[in-house]
Amino acid sequence: FVTGKRKATEVAHAVWRSIVRKGDTVVDATCGNGNDTLALLKMVADERGQGRVYGMDIQDSAIESTSSFLKMAMGDDQQEPVKLFPVCHSRMEEIVPKDTPVRLVAFNLGYLPGGDKTLITVPRTTELALQAASRILSSGGLISVLVYIGHPGGRDELDVVESFASSLPVDTWASCKLQMVNRPIAPVLILLNKKDHSATAITTA
Ligand code: SAM
């Protein structure tokens, strides 16, 4: 599903769709203008109203932008499953109710498109947020990190994400990296899958 015409976010969404089910709880760690939040809402929303998207962004303006984007796209009542918080994603464990199985934590790093380019994700809090995400993720779940490397600081952030990804134990995690090799500054997608040993046991039995 990787072609030159497809945007990196579309590729990420295609991967999410292979993991996320109706009724799941997921986290959008960087809401921005709400495009990813809307995609996630459509994936989890179910008739029983059990799906949840916990969204966060450090900027109040991004939370407002996401909220109005969802209202415009889905109407007032359809966005009930989305809970938005103007906080740093390193605090996601304070937001997602304890012991809730989380199927996906999505990061779309960098700055808010059309916003202040100095208000940007930074390696230290990104690393803390990845650690938090790895603790709340359920077995079989996915941490998806889209890293933009074309702006100052982008490559440092990629280093931190890759270093975190490569530190995950191989018996419980599968870490992989998707990168266009003929487009040196294209965004890099890092996918961290927490292995589901019960599923492995069934398929290998
Ligand atoms: N997912 C968004 C969308 O679909 O429109 C785009 C996200 S944008 C590339 C990155 C966002 O991360 C910005 O809105 C920025 O405010 C936010 N951000 C920066 N530092 C953050 C932090 N520590 N915690 C949460 N969000 C942060």
Image (tube, rainbow, N blue to C red):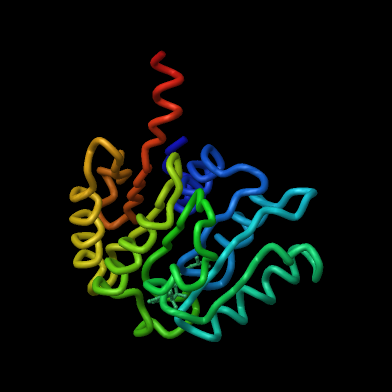
Locate residue 81 relative to residue 107 in the image: left or right: right
Q: x%, y% of residue 156? A: 19, 67
| Residue sticking out furthest to the top | 205
Residue 44 sits above or below residue 118 on the image: above
**Where is residue 17, by image quadrant?**
top right
Identify the residue at image location x=50%, y=57%: 99
Identify the residue at image location x=52%, y=40%: 19
Identify the residue at image location x=75%, y=55%: 49
Identify the residue at image location x=36%, y=46%: 191
Residue 17 sits above or below residue 157 on the image: above
**Where is residue 51, by image quadrant?**
bottom right
**Where is residue 72, by image quadrant?**
bottom right
Q: 152 or 121, which lies in front?
A: 121
Q: x%, y% of residue 141? A: 45, 45
Q: Quadrant of ligand 1?
A: bottom left
Residue 79 sits above or below residue 21 on the image: below
Q: In which quarter of the image is the C terminus?
A: top left
Number of dots carrying numbers: 0
Q: 180 or 160, which lies in front?
A: 160
| Residue sticking out furthest to the front | 99
Q: x%, y% of residue 172? A: 30, 39
Q: x%, y% of residue 120? A: 36, 78
